[in-house]
């Protein structure tokens, strides 16, 4: 059984969420170009139509900057152009709707529901929905005639297009730079895996990084240029090498535990270090378009590893050495192929779906979430009702700039408790800090329009540089920036500051009340999230077993990527649950135990997959086929129990007995099935423990004093 996970108290987990600082999100080059784009948009807009036009153009550039990234140019351009069009449309629609309170509230409510539903398509789509929603709310406070509304929409679109052009300006001369950087990062990550083999109780390393790379490089699927083909080849080889390294890490630990394995274990350690050097050298060459690397140290280290004919003290130890040797040969071939592709043509993977199918898939996903049983639908409905109510309240009270009420609701209200409360607290604290900062700066530094533009440039740089690392810093910079933007149009800062403080507080309180009245607790979501993970593990395991039976292995990559996503979602769900009020520590520990043992399970499946890429694979025996069917049946039962919160069936297959049949079916005198024997044993132990922990979690969920599982 895997070691018990570290215990984290709910308040500690919530404080960790509140103070989270993600240094990996700090990208100075994005901050610099976004600052240039914003400042240029403000200056050009001001030159065209005065300060108000400059503010509108700057707003467009600011909104689109949140869609900027270091993704490949084609993905980046598409996302930013869509954001620019939506921003321009939102500005125009908001300016037109503001003539009537009824139309303004109705349009904002409908848009809020649509923005909430976009969460189903992912974080980027959800963020785009929120940004466009905020834009509609803000511009509805300043109604304009149709012609002028169209003009300001075009100004905002122009600011967004300018920001987009700056982001992709180097596309013609550095076409594959983002893709090369992503692939180089993968090989550096692989070097880290080689230096520090990961134990089976830990999440397989760099899973999200590999999944993101698959998504980012999907646009190269039909790229026929030599550079595009090399990058796809490098990505595919990185996936294969990751499997080999993870399996070698498992063999390294097993060989090291054997009393006679010291020499082989030491040789493996030296090979790992040499592989890390080779992978680092590959990573250094990729950004320059050179698929080169030094594999000579790896080849030399490989010579010191004992071969299959070693005089082993047991058949099992000899089988371990043989499996390690096969994995090393495979890794050596992958390294040589990777370093030699500068002069090679490579095979293509034409698995990318046509855009029509992708569009239909997204529409089907949205349609599937149109139900009160869907967390996304409940979030969209809650957001729409709360924002509509906040907008109506703001329009009925005698306070200036009440659009900050619905704007705050749109930003604070999230699908889960932890994000909503942490955003609410950081939003209020950051707003007040930013207002104080803007007041001090305006009082002591303000010397005219030029000074205001300089201060605005400083704040957007901070917003896009350090802001992504912590939401509190983001809000502080944004609040000060908004005050200065409005002051640029001639509105006294004192009016802006007081109105912003009052309305932000009202909006934050309304968002908290809305969530308290109709909460969506993570405790109702963690079971389905874990169920998704189990179902995807079942699909991955089945695809690997089918490939051993000579089925085409084309399904493996897709199922592996889906498994990674499902695992990340489950881990995030458990993390959010740990910060919810009323959750018992024993529940969190049990869920973490499920995750830990699922890590061991997927490590074993990955090891089985790595065996597919050896020179000679062993076709599955009948006992192995039956074992695989029992594993799939158990994973299906676990997934149903987690999703429906029902008892596990009493007639689950006896996995230990099924594994014993595998051991008894071995052919005397042969060890070719050692990998399968070992990994099916790991699967048995891990899955049996998962079953025990799921049973325990379901019992804890029904224990008196435990928070109810209904939403």
Image (cartoon, rainbow, N blue to C red):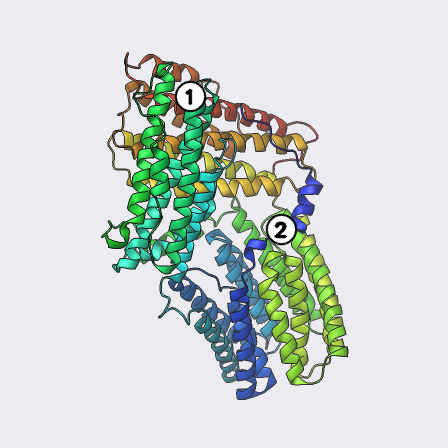
Decide if residue 430 is on the left or right side of residue 216. right
CA–CA distance between discs 2 and 1?
40 Å
- Mark 2 burial class by Cα count in 10 Å: few <14, some 14-19, many 20+: some
Picture mark count: 2
Determine whether the residue tagged by mark 1 lies in a helix, strand or loop.
helix
**Badge 1 density bin: few <14, some 14–19, many ≥20, Cα 10 Å:** many
In the rendered image, residue 172, in percent from the top left (x then y), is placed at 35, 70
Q: Which mark is residue 419?
A: 2
Residue 20 spot, x, y in % from top left: 64, 51
Q: Residue at x 52, y 40 (%)?
A: 570
Task: Tell me the quarter of the image containing the C terminus.
Answer: top right
- Location of residue 464 with respect to 375 vertically, above or below: below
Q: Is residue 549 above or below residue 210?
A: above
Q: 87 or 10: which is nearer to us?
A: 10
At 38% from the left and 31% from the top, the residue drawn is: 607
Can residue 209 be seen here? The reply is yes
Q: Position of residue 650 (x, y in %)?
A: 48, 18
- Residue 397 seen anywhere in this rendered image of the structure: no
* Residue ID for mark 1: 681
N-terminal label among 2 and 1:
2
Query: Residue sitting at 52 percent across and 31 percent down?
Result: 201
Position above or below: 442 against 434? below
Q: Quadrant of residue 698?
A: top right
Mark 2, secondary structure of its residue:
helix
Residue shown at 69%/53% (left/top)? 512
Height in image: 166 above or below 338?
below
Residue 26, percent from left and from top: 56, 59
């Amino acid at each position: 059984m895997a070691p018990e996970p570290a215990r984290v108290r709910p308040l500690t987990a919530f404080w960790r969420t509140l103070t989270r600082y993600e240094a990996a999100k700090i990208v100075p080059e994005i901050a610099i170009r976004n600052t240039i784009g914003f400042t240029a948009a403000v200056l050009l807009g001001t030159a065209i139509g005065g300060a108000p036009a400059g503010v509108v153009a700057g707003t467009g550039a600011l909104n689109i900057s949140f869609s900027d990234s270091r993704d490949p140019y084609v993905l980046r351009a598409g996302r930013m152009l869509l954001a620019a069009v939506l921003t321009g449309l939102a500005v125009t629609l908001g300016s037109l709707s503001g003539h009537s309170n009824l139309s303004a509230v109705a349009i904002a409510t409908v848009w809020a529901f649509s923005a909430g539903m976009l969460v189903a398509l992912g974080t980027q789509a959800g963020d785009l929905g929120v940004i466009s929603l905020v834009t509609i709310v803000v511009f509805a406070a300043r109604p304009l005639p149709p012609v002028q509304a169209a003009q300001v929409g075009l100004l905002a679109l122009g600011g967004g297009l300018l920001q987009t052009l700056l982001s992709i300006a180097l596309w013609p001369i550095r076409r594959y730079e983002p893709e090369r950087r992503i692939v180089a990062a993968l090989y550096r990550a692989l070097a880290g895996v080689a230096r520090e083999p990961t134990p089976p109780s830990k999440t397989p390393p760099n899973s999200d990084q590999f999944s993101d790379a698959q998504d980012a490089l999907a646009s190269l699927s039909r790229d026929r240029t030599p550079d595009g083909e090399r990058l796809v080849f490098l990505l595919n080889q990185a996936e294969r090498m990751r499997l080999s390294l993870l399996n070698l890490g498992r063999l390294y630990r097993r060989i090291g535990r054997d009393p006679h394995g010291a020499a082989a274990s030491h040789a493996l350690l030296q090979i790992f270090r040499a592989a890390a050097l080779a992978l680092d050298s590959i990573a250094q060459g990729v950004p320059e378009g050179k698929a080169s690397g030094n594999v000579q140290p790896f080849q030399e280290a490989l010579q010191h590893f004992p071969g299959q004919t070693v005089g082993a003290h047991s058949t099992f130890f000899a089988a371990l050495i043989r499996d390690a040797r096969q994995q090393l040969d495979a890794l050596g071939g992958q390294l040589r192929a990777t370093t030699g592709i500068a002069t090679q043509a490579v095979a293509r993977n034409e698995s990318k779906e046509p855009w029509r199918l992708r569009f239909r898939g997204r529409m089907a996903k949205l349609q599937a979430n149109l139900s009160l049983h869907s967390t996304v639908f409940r979030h969209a409905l809650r957001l729409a009702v709360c924002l509509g109510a906040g907008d109506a309240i703001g329009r009925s009270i005698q306070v200036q700039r009440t659009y900050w009420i619905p704007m705050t609701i749109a930003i604070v209200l999230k699908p889960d408790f932890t994000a909503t409360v942490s955003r609410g607290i950081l939003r209020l604290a950051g707003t007040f800090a930013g207002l104080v900062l803007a007041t001090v700066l305006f009082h002591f530094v303000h010397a005219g329009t030029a000074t205001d533009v300089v201060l605005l440039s400083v704040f957007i740089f901070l917003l896009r540089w350090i802001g992504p690392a912590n939401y509190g810093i983001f809000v502080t910079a944004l609040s000060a920036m908004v005050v200065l933007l409005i002051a640029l149009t001639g509105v006294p800062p004192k009016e802006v500051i007081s109105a912003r403080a009052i309305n932000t507080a009202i909006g934050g309180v309304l968002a908290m009340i809305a969530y308290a009245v109709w909460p969506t607790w993570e405790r109702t979501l963690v079971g389905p999230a874990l169920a998704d993970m189990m179902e995807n593990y079942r699909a991955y395991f089945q695809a690997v077993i089918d490939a051993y039976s000579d089925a085409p292995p084309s399904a493996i990559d897709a199922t592996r990527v889906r498994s990674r996503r499902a695992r990340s979602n489950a881990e995030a769900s458990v993390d959010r649950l740990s910060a919810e009020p009323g959750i018992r520590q024993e529940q969190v520990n049990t869920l973490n135990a499920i995750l830990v043992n699922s890590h061991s399970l997927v490590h074993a499946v990955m090891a089985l997959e790595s065996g597919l890429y050896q020179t000679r694979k062993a076709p599955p025996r009948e006992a192995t086929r039956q074992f695989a069917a029992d594993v799939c049946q158990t994973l299906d039962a676990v997934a149903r129990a987690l999703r429906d919160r029902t008892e596990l069936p009493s007639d689950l297959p006896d996995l230990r007995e099924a594994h014993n049949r595998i051991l008894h079916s071995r052919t005397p005198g042969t060890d070719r099935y050692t990998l399968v024997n070992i990994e099916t044993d790991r699967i048995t132990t891990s899955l049996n423990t998962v079953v025990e922990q799921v049973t325990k979690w379901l019992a804890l969920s029904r224990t008196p004093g435990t928070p109810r599982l209904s939403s």
